Amino acid sequence: MTDPSDEAKQIEKLYEFGERLNEAKDKSQNVKDYEGIIEAAKTSLKAKQLAAQLIPRFFKFFPDLSSRAVDAHLDLIEEEELGVRVQAIRGLPLFCKDTPEYLSKIVDILVQLLAAEEIVERDAVHKALMSLLRQDVKASLTALFKHIGSVDEPSTDEFIREKVLSFIRDKVFPLKAELLKPQEEMERHITDLIKKSLEDVTGAEFRMFMDFLKNLSLFGEKAPTERMKELIGIIEGQADLDAQFNVSDADHIDRLISCLYMALPFFLRGASGSKFLNYLNKHIIPVFDKLPEERKLDLLKALAEISPYTTPQDSRQILPSVAVLLKKYMPLRKTGGEEMNFTYVECLLYTFHHLAHKAPNATNSLCGYKIVTGQPSDRLGEDFSDCYKDFTERLSTVEDLTRATMKKLTQGLADHNKEMAAAKTDEAKEKIKTQKQNTTTGLRTCNNILAMSKPLHSKTPSFIGDKSVNLSWKEATKPSVPSTTTASGGKRPASINGSGNTASKKGRGSGGLQNQLVNRALEGISRGGRGGIRGRGRGWGARGRGRGYR
């Protein structure tokens, strides 16, 4: 332990060095004073704290002593005493104030210190990094993103990578308006850094970066079409639309559906969904039966939501596949044990209408209609009467099943109201409220099916191409029921992403057959959420990235 009198002398000496340097007109001549400050960093506790302030303050005047000064300061950062470490961290930005060539190195040091356990120390690191960002945002961001990594330059420390991502998310992104100046130049710079990092990210990280990018003025409401194409291009890259699809690759399926949902807002703003639609048409819809049950409904919902924004050319291309899938899920006739997944049918009818609205005569050969456009593709000279008979019979069966189900649901709703009036506890009331919400969603689904099936009986139907039908899940209130398989003997998922199979549980109670019928009607009603990003672990599957969705 340093003798108090020795410590006092050391402190006094340090003040003398500092005062002489402050007063000197040509500070570079006071080499001995600056060397004295560097040496004091190896003495007593209080001297170290004072040296931690003085070393960076006069650093720029002594380039020949730069290595010794930085080494001495780094030793202070590794001190056992918290007060010394914090003081040394606070001084780090000063090394770059007039010597910007040190900025990248200082950022690297601070990044390593993001792992500090002490809150006051971590806070000092955050403030130091923010100070550097304000000094030189371009160089600081470049140095920070280096620690996130890319395929060409992967991050070597996963723990530090996570800390850097958290810092960028929590500290940098919220201050984008303040930090990113000049705006257009810096927004472009951070966009380029993000795009490079997106080569190797988890699903959650990708969503975080996309949420940030779409809120930049660069991609704002007034952004030109080229900017929307850029964002869609980023999402298409993550969806891996150039890869051959393997139906057993659950990670790719998750990624594809999640990216499709992320792209939806940009389709609304005029970006093209052609590449997604072509991939779905070529690779996904042909193997729809083999997809995981919990992802089928997510895919059909995404397809329904994108359908109003497709081009006539894309609509004509994908319509045959959608028509085949629609017929598959519309029973030809009612049989004793046959079930129908109502939400599947709602999704597919909605998609069919919006695609057919833009390519109406394509339905002549698919459904036996007689729509005249004057084009050779009308194919009016051919006989498709069997197609028309089959399609309209299936529509009639769907309508019969839907009306029967609506009757059960309406009765179920009345029963729920009686149960609510009789309920004594908050828990019981909450349970009944959930049941009512699910039943109401089921009724919306049924109403939509009837509204969309009715015009399709005509030989020359008018296809719905506006917003007159509001998809049932767009109004759904949580919690809602997971999707299920409609195949005979198929298993139903017990839960999806923690969402319990509420409808199935209801049938176990005192409602008997009545409740079971209501439950069956609800089995197609999915959770209200997106086909979201599920699970951590970086890489989006078998792409050599090492970070997976699940």
Image (cartoon, grey):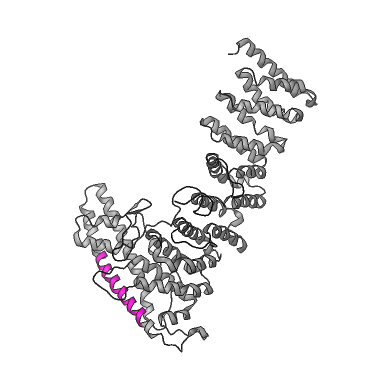
Q: Quadrant of the N terminus?
A: top right
Percent coordinates x, y for residue 261 in the rendering: 48, 59
Residue 488: name its quadrant: bottom left
The answer to whether residue 131 is visible is no
Decide if residue 443 is on the left or right side of residue 163.
left
Which residue is found at the position 42% from the left and 65% from the top? 300
Residue 394 vs residue 184, the one in the foreground: 394
Q: Residue at x 71, y 38 (%)?
A: 101
As drawn, 55 above or below 385: above
The count of marks equals 0
Tell me where residue 372 appears, x and y as whole percent.
Answer: 47, 85
Q: For the point 27% across and 52% down, which residue is it?
A: 431
Q: Position of residue 287 (x, y in %)?
A: 43, 66
Q: Height in image: 317 above or below 226?
A: below
Magenta: main secondary structure equals: helix
Is 492 inside the magenta-drawn segment?
no
Q: Residue at x 57, y 34 (%)?
A: 113
What stretch of residues is rendered in magenta? 389-409
Q: Is 401 a magenta residue? A: yes
Taking the image as shown, residue 199 lies to the left or right of residue 63, namely left
Task: Give the image quarter of residue 96.
Answer: top right
Q: Position of residue 144 (x, y in %)?
A: 61, 42
